[in-house]
Image: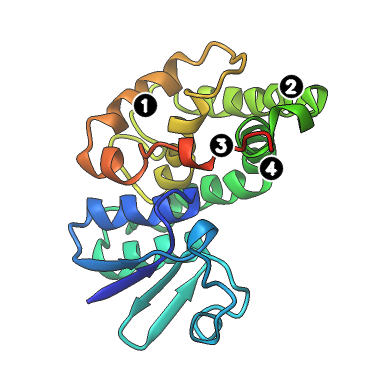
Amino acid sequence: MLKLWGRNTSINVQKVLWVLGELDLAYDRIDVGGAFGGLDQPAFLALNPNGLIPVLEDGDAHIWESHAIIRYLAAKYDAGGLWPEDPADRAQADQWMEWHVTTLYPDFIATFLGLVRTPPSQRNMASIELAAKRAGWHYEKLEEHLEGRDFICGDSLTMGDIPLGATLYRYFTLEIERPDLPNIEAWYARLQERAAYRDGVMISYEGLRATEG
């Protein structure tokens, strides 16, 4: 059976949980990271020397980095579905996964960390508001891409939807100003119709919220 290491409140773990749910794969999940600790233990470092989650075990294969795990699961268990068979379609999914890492995520996570993981008295609101504005600019590029598309690569869900879609629950529940994003909101509504998305991604982050003291 597959084994997934990582707490379910980690957005990087949530990406993998979503994929596992979409593919209806049986797995065991082990809570490590955050309040659970364990990332510095020899047994875990033997799986991922970086001491980070998530890690997927599939037999003798130990895979770390969430996007590598997504690609692995899609290629092995859903070729022609989450893993597009056509190289051009696969490259389109891939490029948006890379765009998530290089362009969107730095400003998205700076906004989230600033508003949720930082005690109110320690927040640099100017920096947080700038990060939120920059994240909005990035989402506007995605908004343009989704014009006339139900999902990132067209009419069906692929691996390209997973990293970007996983940000939406947090993005739309943060108390920030957002640009008008009707195509993304429609896409988000379609994702919420999927049980795997609701179960894997729409997990409260209140337990991560920093308080004073």
Tell me the element at label 2: helix
The image shows residue 186, relative to residue 53, as above or below, that is: above
CA separation in Å, label 1 and label 4 = 22 Å
Residue mark closest to the camera, 1 vs 4: 4
Q: Amino acid at mark 2?
A: Glu
CA separation in Å, label 2 and label 3 = 18 Å
Q: What x and y, as percent, mark residue 55?
A: 45, 70
Relative to 169, 82 lies left or right: left
Packing grade of label 3 (10 A; few <14, some 14-19, many >=20) is few
Residue mark closest to the camera, 1 vs 2: 2
| Residue 174 visible (yes or no) | yes
Q: Which residue is at the front of the view, 190 or 122?
A: 122
Residue where numbered disc 3 is placed: 209
CA separation in Å, label 4 and label 3 = 19 Å
Residue where numbered disc 2 is placed: 129
Relative to 182, 28 lies left or right: left
Residue where numbered disc 4 is placed: 106
CA separation in Å, label 1 and label 2 = 25 Å
Q: Considering the image in quadrants, where does the N terminus appear?
A: bottom left
Q: Which residue is at the front of the view, 160 or 84?
A: 160
Residue where numbered disc 1 is placed: 187
Packing grade of label 1 (10 A; few <14, some 14-19, many >=20) is many
Tell me the element at label 4: helix
The number of callouts visible is 4
